[in-house]
Amino acid sequence: MPLASGTRLGPYEVIGPLGAGGMGEVYRARDTRLDRTVALKILPAVLLLCLAASGCGYGCYSGFWNGNASGAAFSNSSCPLTKATGAVIVQMSAASATFPSPLASRRDVHHIFVTLRGIEARPSRVADEDSPTWQELAPDLAARPVQLDLLAPSAPLDLSGNSPSLDVHVSANIPATVPADEYRQVRLRLLPRDLAVDDLIPESNACGNAGWNCIVFADRSVRPLEFDSATAEFPVPLEPGRNSLFRVLPGEIVQLSIEFDGNASVFFASTAAVRLVPVFRVASQNSSLATNAQ
């Protein structure tokens, strides 16, 4: 559908059409932040923006048009003026579920304690633990790791406050600035059992000698969680039929909810440890920075 004069795509305001072809439509627009004219090329479901900025040469951006006067733009250019960003606030919780569930089918599970030290997201679908493109969504966790019980929903908690209790939601109320993009992977980074010299720890630990991540059974026995790789983390992959877990638009805040689904998760127990295969549900809601500032 042609864009009318005055249509806003993030910070860009459409002035009028320049031309059209088999690859899409080109519009003259104004960058309201830099007060200069740019050219917008609209492809099916994708926005390509090229502009000339003083001192930076030509920069090319790609993004997403969702049909309601908002778009996303992110740059591969090294020019600092061309990097569009948004912000993310993360909240973790447990699904409202009554046990028994698949987790408790063989032996009652009362608690699943995990110690978070990071929540990260990445645009690519390809798993790469060491990629520099992972974006930290909860920076406070690096300085204040949080141990929480995945089976004990409670009130939200601000990660920037005092040390939390063990049975709470985890809520990062201070937004993390990240590049505008579509994010297709999320991972929960956990404190490993064998700590490095500089690893920070919570003030208390419900797992005791079992490490920092564990399952507590009804008979009060505690077994450590073990992981597929040397890194203690839980991946949150794309659900079938979804193109992304969440989308960050320029100048907007994403309220990101990560919910543990105990009914869909399973575990495999041995005499020494437990391997948990968790399922997390991700939901997001976008709002503008201006709206959140009011």
Image (cartoon, helix red, strand yellow):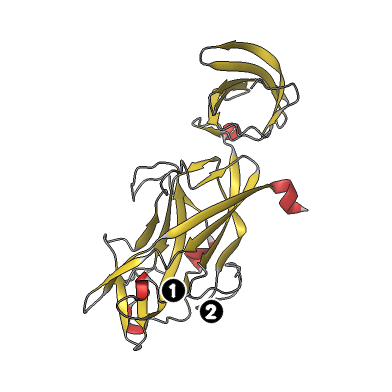
Residue shown at 36% from the left, 72% from the top:
103
The quadrant in which residue 31 appears is: top right
Within 10 Å of disc 2 (Cα), the crowding (few <14, some 14-19, many 20+) is: some
Percent position (x, y) of residue 96? 52, 69
Q: Give whichever of 163, 66 is nearer the camera.
A: 66
Q: Which residue is mark 2?
A: 165
The quadrant in which residue 216 appears is: bottom left
- Which residue lies most toward the right here? 294
Q: Give whichever of 132, 11 is nearer the camera.
A: 11
Q: How far apart are the two marked residues, 1 and 2, measured between alpha carbons? A: 14 Å
Looking at the rendered structure, the secondary structure element under dot 2 is: loop
Viewport quadrant of the N terminus: top right
Percent position (x, y) of residue 184? 44, 45
Mark 1 belongs to which amino acid? Ile
Q: Is residue 46 above or below residue 222?
A: above
Looking at the rendered structure, the secondary structure element under dot 1 is: loop
* Res. 201 mark: 1
Q: Is residue 253 above or below residue 194?
A: above
Q: Is residue 283 above or below residue 79?
A: below
Residue shown at 68% from the left, 22% from the top:
3
Percent position (x, y) of residue 40? 61, 21
Counting residues from the start of the chain, the first of labels 1 and 2 encountered is 2
